[in-house]
Image (cartoon, rainbow, N blue to C red):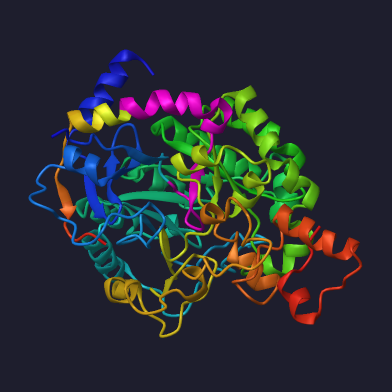
Amino acid sequence: MKVRRGRILAIKWGMNPNSSSLGVDVTFLLVGATALAVVTPIVGAWLRWRRNKPDVHDAA
Amino acid sequence: MTLRELVARVTASRGMRRARLERFGAIVQLAWPRALVFVDRAMARRVVRGLKGEPWNDSESALGEHVLSAPLEAHLQLTNRCGAGCAGCYTGASPAGAPNEWGLAEWKRALDVLGAAGVFHVALGGGESTTLPWLGELAAHARLRGIVPNLTTSGLEGLARLLAIADRFGQINVSLDGLGATYAAVRGFDGFARADAAIRALRAVKREVGINVVVTRRNFDELAAIFAYARERRLSEVELLRFKPSGRGARAYDELRCTDAQHRAFLPTILAAARRHRVRVKVDCSYTPMLAHHQPDRALLAELAVYGCTGGDFLVGAKADGRLTACSFMGSPEGRPRVTDLAAYWRAPDAFGAFRRWRDAREPCASCAYHDLCRGGCKVASAHVARDPAAPDPECPRVVDHVRAIEARGSVPHERARRHLPTLR
């Protein structure tokens, strides 16, 4: 049986130092979906290469 | 970045990852590149080590369909003491601070609770939190709990102390609402030279330094120059914040909030500036209606985790006395829970009230293609203008157009509708 590879749903880039609201990096809007389509598989490969351990076990 | 620096960063990132299970799958925090990655269950099984059997006990849902298992980040107002006296200060900070402010021990307990819940980041602010002698110890405690502490400062106080502990923070941004005289026009006093000096000093010891810019009608025309300034100072980002009618900002709202024309021009203006000066640009959650106005690729927004109001879901706030809030601009919900009560309150019925009832949308939000991302815009603006946080964001161009169309048809909204659809142009 073929195992589904799964997919990245979203990537929230950077960290938010602003203590009043949630900041989101919109620089990718400059280059559009194509650039993100290139970056996302690289992040996926990076994730698979460095598997990690969950620290919270209860699913919502 | 040189190849050597790149290798050093990749090496340093080892062992600095965390993962948290969610109904849709999992969220994985990457130390480098710095990102939170939302993955579905199939991918979570492949990338999260230690999963045995079926760790989820309910059906898989889409990202955004349900409230997260815990916030991604918490915004902690460590103190409301600040001597700057900015005209639009959203917390109404003063040299005296707030009554019953928490100290180091209480905030450490809060971090223990947030860490146990799986919160990834905290944004520390005030008031001016760099005046607190225990700020560095608190940042170190956050790291111990697996939380990345980030910081906003005015740069006007506590600089020497901050320089010594800057490496404990993930990102430090200095509030800079204008260059030269514009700074004074927005804030009400001339603090540009001191803020600039702080930025230069911080950048000398840390790469991840940026600026927070509250965008007002007085500095809107200067945005391109602000990006040029960020480039010149080699800053890592410019984060743009919408002016909120909160604290002293409620009194200054009509005078300082951007015009409707400026809101419609916001996205092309900032993208052009970011492109020209090659600086990363971030916008705060309240700007999502202004992004949606240009009808960008909806899937792209979702992939970038561009959401509107996610108070009480992706984020929570805590006041200087520890009171839990959905977002930093709002008061505490009924029952006045503390941030240390997060685990119990998070799953309470009707927790965070209107913030989590965003699906009960009225027009023109109900028919908006971006509503499940935008979630009705900024509830702080709605609460101030319409006296109802659940009302459509009064500064959203779509809302403004909707009201104009009603008026053009000659049908005057009755009093209740007028209250819920105020017109700010």
Residue B383 found in image quarter: bottom right
Residue B69 found in image quarter: bottom left
Q: Is residue B47 visible?
A: yes
Farthest residue to the bottom: give it: B335
Q: How many marks?
A: 0
Q: At 69% across and 35% down in the image, what residue appears?
A: B268
* Residue B216 sits above or below residue A4 on the image: below
Q: Is residue A41 magenta?
A: yes
Q: Is residue B188 visible?
A: no
- Residue B66 % position (x, y): 37, 61
- Residue B18 % position (x, y): 22, 46
Q: At 67% across and 77% down in the image, what residue appears?
A: B387
* Residue B227 sits above or below residue B134 on the image: above
- Residue B198 % position (x, y): 52, 41
Q: At 50% across and 37% down in the image, what residue appears?
A: B300
Q: Nearer the viewer, residue B91 or B423?
A: B423
Q: Is residue B182 left or right of residue B304?
A: right
Q: At 33% across and 70% down in the image, what residue appears?
A: B103
Q: Is residue B15 left or right of residue B263?
A: left
Farthest residue to the top: give it: B3
Screen quadrant of the N terminus of chain A? top left
| Magenta extent | A16-42
Q: Nearer the viewer, residue B51 or B30?
A: B51
Q: Is residue B292 magenta?
A: no
Screen quadrant of the C terminus of chain A? bottom left
* Residue B1 sits above or below residue B107 on the image: above
Q: Nearer the viewer, residue B146 or B117?
A: B117
Residue B226 found in image quarter: top right
- Residue B63 % position (x, y): 38, 52
